[in-house]
Image: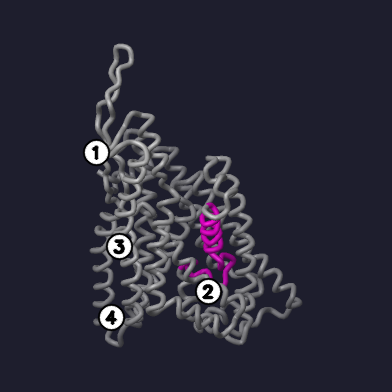
Amino acid sequence: MLSSIVDAFKVPELRKKILFTLGILALYRLGAYIPVPGIPVSDFASQAFSQAGVSMTMLDLFTGGALSNFSVFSLGIMPYITASIIMQLMQGVIPAVGRWGREGEPGRRKITQVTRYLTLVLGLINAIGYLLLFKSPQYGVVFSDQVPEVVTDVVIVFTLVAGTAFIMWMGELITQRGIGNGMSLIIFISIVSRVPAAIYSSITQTSADMGMAIAVTVLIVVVVLVCIPLIIFVERAQRRIPVNYAKRVQGRKMFGGQSTYIPLKVNSAGVIPIIFASCIIYFPAQLAALFNVDWLTAVANAMSTGWINWIITVGLIVFFAYFYTSMVYNPEETSDNLRKQGGYIPGVRPGSPTVQYIKDVLRRVTLPGALFIAAIAVVPTILFYFTGNQLIQAFGGTSILIMISVALDTMGKVESQLKMHNYDGFFK
């Protein structure tokens, strides 16, 4: 792997993309420590956010600590992810939006534009909610009185919304001019940035016995390292449907006659079900931040931890695994392409039987993949619920799956670039 990294920096075009990506991610992390104007930084960090509930703590995890700093990037990438979920659902509900999804590049541009506007609207709602929440008696944050309070409120809300727009712009820049998916990398770096603090917290707070605390921390890290190969194995696992091509004679040449396969990934949705499910689960926390109602806060905390959270998480992950797979994979189109190219699945008649066969295989393959990522996401959450170890929360199944999936996707992008220049990639 080290030689592949060296080879990547030997290619000028690839080196520029990697450095550009790292520069944007560094800028994002810098923004997580720049507080909004008028906020009493020391009081907020030491007093206000120390009273945060479970739901707010999880939201802070996905912002890389920006929320606990009340920085310009406090809203994080969640408004954009929520807007993307809404647009994905609308493609199956609103016919006009569904047609955009089938129009190719022009349709995708329309969907992207609407997603951007929706992100700003959601960011505005979240910004107002956080402002009202932190000014409430629950947190009691007192802003600077050197300017009128309404002016401070407007500046804070504008800064938070502008921060969300800036994050969205940086993510799109990475996707267009860097390496990998920009939004996924921003989530990746947000989670990774919390790991060192979680390790320190595990060592110092797990037990009064320092030796026992270090042993527990080392055990958690070892278990995580053991689970990583298993997760990678499932992420790369495929169900291959054999395909034969009939022989065709054109002039004096013969075409076809070879055999190949249709690769169907066990986890074809990747980390998307985890991200979508997390956004849905923590949406009540965002509503609680907006309205600051006791019963809504209680519901948000209940959905963020405990057996209610575990059941909802499993159900949503399985649902989004099937939903996203149906969005990105079209059996009708695959069957039609096979028919046009003279291909067929052995033992299955062309046309509707082929479509139904592919649907059945997809249905059977998606279920174990969905249950696997659901188990990886829920089991560490259960352990954290009974132990309270911060490292388990930072190294939770959701975090591990996101980190591994994003890392594999990014490495795959770098490998494809290396192969274009006759270099060996990461995967041998």
The foreground one among 130 and 354 is: 354
Tags 4 and 1 in contact by the CB under 8 Å rule?
no
The residue tagged 4 is 213
How many numbered dots are placed on residues in this image?
4
Q: CA distance from mark 2 to mark 3?
A: 26 Å
Labels 1 and 3: the sequence-earlier one: 1
Q: For mark 3, does the 10 Å Cα neighbourhood hold few (<14), some (14 to 19), or many (20 or more) residues?
A: some
The foreground one among 18 and 67 is: 67
Q: CA distance from mark 2 to mark 1?
A: 50 Å
The residue tagged 1 is 347
Specify the segment rendered in magenta: 62-91
Question: In the image, is residue 39 part of the stretch drawn in magenta?
Answer: no
Tags 2 and 1 in contact by the CB under 8 Å rule?
no
Q: Amino acid at mark 4?
A: Ala
Q: Amino acid at mark 2?
A: Pro
Labels 3 and 4: the sequence-earlier one: 4
Labels 4 and 1: the sequence-earlier one: 4
Tell me the element at label 4: helix
User: Residue 284, labelled with which disc?
Assistant: 2
